[in-house]
Image: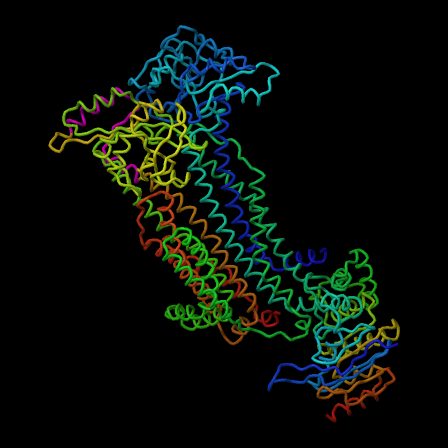
Amino acid sequence: MRVQLLMALRYLRTRKTRTALTTLAILFGVAILFGMNTILPSMMQVFRQGMLAAAGEVDLVFSSVTDGPFPADRVEVVRQVEGVAEAAGSLRQNVLMPASLVGTTDPLQGVNSVTVVSVEPEAARRIRMYPTQKGRFLEPGDGDVVVISQGLAEKLSLDVGDTLTLPSAEGTTSLEVVGVLQWASPPGTEEVYVPLTTAQRLLNMPGQVNGIEVILKPQTDRAKAEQAILAALGEGFQPKPLELGEEMFASLQIGEKVFGIFGVAALAIGAFIILNTFRTVVTERRHDLGMLRAVGASRRAVVGLILTESLLQGALGTILGLLAGYGLAALLVAVVNPVLRLFLRMEITSLVVTPQNVVAAVVLGLGATLVGGLWPALTAGRVTPLEALRPVVPGVYERATRRRAVAGAVLLVLAAIALLTGNFQMVSLGTLLFLAGLVLVAPAAVEPLARLFGRLLALIFAREGRLAEGNIARQPNRAAVTASAIMIGLAMVVALTGMVTSVSDGFMGYVERTLRADLLVMPTSMMLGGGNVGAGPEMARSVREIPGVAEVATLRLGAAAIDGQMFQVVGIDPQRHPRVSGLIFSQGDPDEAYAALGRERALIVNAIFAAQNRIQPGTTTMIQTPTGKHEYRIVAVASDYLNAKLATAYVSHANLERDFGQTADLLFMVDVDEGADFAAVRGRLEEIVRRYPAFILVEQRAFRQSQEEALRNNMTILYLVMALLVVPSLLATANTLVINVMERTREIGVLRAVGSTRRQVRRMILAESLLLSALGAAFGILAGLWLGYVMTQAMNTVGFIGIPYYFPYAGILGAIALGLLIGVAAAVLPARRAARLDIVAALRYE
Amino acid sequence: MTLIHTENLTRVYGSGETAVVALDHVNLTVEEGQFVAVMGPSGCGKSTLLHLIGGLDRPTEGRVVLNGYDLGRLSDDALTALRRRKIGFVFQFFNLIPVLTALENAALPLLLDGVKAEAARRRAAEWLDRMGLGDRLHHRPDQLSAGQQQRVAIARALVTEPALILADEPTGNLDSRAGDEIAALLRRIVSEWGRTVLLVTHDPRIAAYADRIIFLKDGRIVDETRLSGEGNDQEAQALRRWMEAF
């Protein structure tokens, strides 16, 4: 082993450019993977820390399984449980602060949300310390008063005696500040403390709380107490999980997966680079390897030598990749923090490096090198001692193996059949077959393709083009591996640009069909739930009374669970809703479904819900609601724009009120009579909305525009990351060219000796590079078209109904442009190297 | 004592009409401590004979018994181990590992055999010293002359203290002065250090250092002669005449 290490190190040192390029490839993949996996959990950690800080020194916190409100009398039940020293009910909800109430539109300076924490003053003081800096804490008998944190007091320039106005179910509620607490609020939350009765009125939840905080007597077994309390509370309660902003978490998790795919793709390219490098290494060192076998190295020792060498590079690339990844994450933090501060009032202070992420990055980094190095190593093991004694045969033509090409063609046909079945699982399997098939067929396709592109190239490069074509065709396997590496990068580009168009269009189609009302009255943030204060029934009534309003439909929100799995419940009015807007149905008859919603305990579920719970329309299921378990019938699968990302079920307003205790309206969709004066209706509506600062009035067209813009912004980030994938493709091409130049040093010497100019040599290498990247682009476009189509189908299968497929013209043009760019950029270094070769030294080169 | 014994040793390359018989039922016995030179024109099968005896290639027919081991019965691993411990190879093109120093190249077989690095280096240094390269231990092959490179290769062949040295045209790539030096070294390997040397060459001047000459033609042994082993000109002339007869 020692010898192998010594030799591997020496070999790596003598071929510095090649070692650097190969190492860089691994570095890049690991960096993307590790960097992204570091920053995303760090963001989640920040959210969690915010939650922990909010939980204070309480021993246990309980909530309903659905996190919804429940009657306040449950607190008394908990107090009676043995071991409980004190229990206090609380109503806690995030409330978005409209700019009109905060007095500033600068979100960095101002406050865009507060957490209303209701307390029973007596019980609460026994549970927590509330040291005030000024004024007093809440006392029994308090009415519309509030205690705020020091930070909030400073930001809003409030003092004891001033008034804090919050958006509420009644429109707004003004509270007198009676005290300022000493501590600063945890990140992302500004807690304001109000008496329970006030909070219940403010949030339209009379007689209800949504959490019970418990302090245990000393020496009480925590786990036992928790069980006892849960037993006493009855079904439907849980120790409160520290979770917040589920939509945010869902997005982050999707982000984690997407970046994971990018990282793995980059590493796959890295593996291809390693493969190519070591295939050359083995050919180049046939003599050395044969000699080693002759003087007594076993096959295993030779395999070990090549593997050691590739693993050394893998290890080096992985270590540097971890560092670069951490740097990348740190850089991203610097970019993201201002945004986080702006919208969430929190920031990432430290990056979370979990052992799992390090291990995953190391395993994948070394894994890629092992996979890339294994085949060449095994080939090396088969080198016989006699090869040491044979004279060098220059310029061996590699032959593309026919068997492999046939196997690849078979795989391609199978993949096409899988695609035709239309079955999602088959199609996914088909994708793997397709990529594998393409890689296998590639070597055989190199020659005809090289000839085809060579003809094009001949127009510009004349003789050098012919030479380049020959040079590519003589190493079809190496050219194919390089092309495959480029293929991965460009396929992503083609597939994703197609996807982006499809998704944008699909989503805008959603907006058009499910939010088609003329006017929308919506919370200041479009996340349903997420801290929005709903309006009482009064508001909807007054909107309906406006002359010229044809119909008003509202959305309400609750939460429920099946087998502990949470989902959101959206309340709709089964009569009014279809008139103003609509759901997009994928299963079930719309008319019947709406009728069932009005008639019985029925659910229309979205596809995510159906997939998560494996539930089909027509079945019944027990769901956990804040008032206990109820049997609901699933009548259809459908979705709308707002609820496309989370598991969602739609119920009637009546059922939402009865089983979930929710009556607050969160979104109003208003249709105006055709003959009516639109401006007048709008004006009257504005007046009403002004009384409810938690809401804003938006015209449908404006809303669509804002959504389109937001989508475009999201996609820009995707494009940036995509650009990152081009780098490893570039490395792969440069690496192959460096190898080609090195291997043909003597030939280039001959060319120069018989009269080629430096310029001609440079142009030959450039032509070679362009040919390679053209091959890669051809494969990449093919694979990208396939991937894009399959991904669109996949989106439709997992719940985004009605995403159209678009042929990615832009992506193809982009891939061709990037291919050209790769071709030119990759050639710079090798071409210069080849042109500058010293003729005499080159002729002597071995 | 017999070191090498071959029975009906035959090697055919290719098959059918294109088959070439490189070695045709060769029976040869070499005693320990002999310096044997195999001579013959190009393509007579002399290299093939060497490869088969060294276990680098497998015969089509017949067998090789080396130091009591029937090579045909050994697994690849056992054969590799035998090569490592019992046989030293010297090639025409030296075949040193370009990235290792002279010392590391010479120590390679020991390192491959699992000998501790320090001991391996010490033994390699001793042999290099005997080859007159005591001051070149840390030079890489490209920093040495051709003759010096071949002497490193000989040190590498001797470092495991093998019974047999197989040399395939070891002077083919050297000028005549360096060639003489290498031939003299091979002579010392037999006379001073008691090893057996089997040398393949077509150069009568080099073969004249051997004490037994085997003449090979068309894969068969056609003649054999004994020499004084002093490498003198008369014997070399006789050999040259013999070669020219072909």
Quick check: A591 left or right of A796? left
- Quadrant in the picture for residue A19: bottom right
Nearer-the-camera pick, A584 or A377 = A584
Q: Is residue A525 above or below residue A309?
A: above
Q: Residue furthest bottom?
A: B245
Q: Is residue B119 above or below residue A540?
A: below
Image quadrant where one finds the N terminus of chain A: bottom right
Q: Position of residue A730 (x, y in %)?
A: 47, 56
Q: How many marks?
A: 0
Nearer-the-camera pick, B136 or A697 = A697
Q: Is residue A822 magenta?
A: no
Q: What secondary structure is the stretch in magenta mostly built from?
A: helix
Q: Residue at x 29, y 36 (%)?
A: A706
- Quadrant in the picture for residue A638: top left
Q: Is residue A367 above or below residue A576?
A: below
Q: Position of residue B58 (x, y in %)?
A: 70, 75
- Quadrant in the picture for residue B104: bottom right
What kind of colouring is applied to the model shown?
rainbow
Tell me which segment is drawn in magenta.
A679-708
Q: Is residue A695 magenta?
A: yes
Quick check: B223 left or right of A171? right
Q: Position of residue A532 (x, y in %)?
A: 35, 25
Q: Is residue B217 above or below residue A117?
A: below
Nearer-the-camera pick, A112 or A354 = A354
Image quadrant where one finds the C terminus of chain A: bottom right
Q: Residue furthest left?
A: A675
Q: Position of residue A547 (x, y in %)?
A: 14, 25
Nearer-the-camera pick, A408 or B146 = A408
Quick check: A463 left or right of A275? left
